Amino acid sequence: MQRKSKLCRNCFLESKQYPNSKVKHLSKDGYFYVYFRKHPYSDKSGRVFEHRIIMEQKLRRYLFPFENVHHKNGIKSDNR
């Protein structure tokens, strides 16, 4: 337990991860990414592209690293 917080360190770090926190960051390439360390295909920093997570939820399975997700309208930041 931290002194000034009511959460332990692990609970605090999990609150900053994707399912609990909907904070998005924009990469230099124009794609949104989120922090999700528990994802099996996250990078060393724990980042996963948001369009991949949305497609995984739609397909109800994890995407393999060789599978690509294409945006219908060609706008990289539009994940509809």
Image (cartoon, helix red, strand yellow):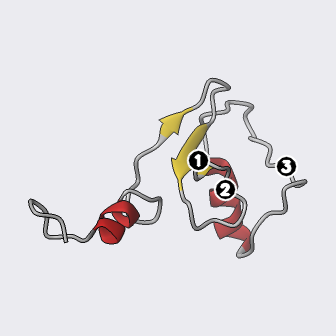
User: Residue at label 3?
Assistant: 68
**Which residue corresponds to the image point at 45% horizontal and 65% vertical from the top-left?**
19
- Residues marked 3 and 2 touching at CB (< 8 Å): no
Q: How far is disc 2 from disc 1 in space, using C-alphas? A: 8 Å
Q: How far is disc 1 from disc 3 in space, using C-alphas? A: 21 Å
User: Residue at label 2?
Assistant: 42
Q: Is residue 66 left or right of residue 76?
A: right
Kind of residue sitting beneath label 1? Ser
**Which residue corresponds to the image point at 57% horizontal and 43% vertical from the top-left?**
33
- Secondary structure at numbered mark 1: loop
User: Can residue 28 be seen in the rendering of this structure?
Assistant: yes
Q: Quadrant of residue 59?
A: bottom right
Kind of residue sitting beneath label 3? Asn
Q: How far is disc 3 from disc 2 in space, using C-alphas? A: 15 Å
Residue 45: numbered disc: 1
Q: Quadrant of residue 4?
A: bottom left
**Which residue corresponds to the image point at 60% horizontal and 34% vertical from the top-left?**
77
Q: Quadrant of the N terminus?
A: bottom left
**Which residue corresponds to the image point at 25% horizontal and 71% vertical from the top-left?**
8
Rendering coords of residue 60 (x, y %) = 70, 76
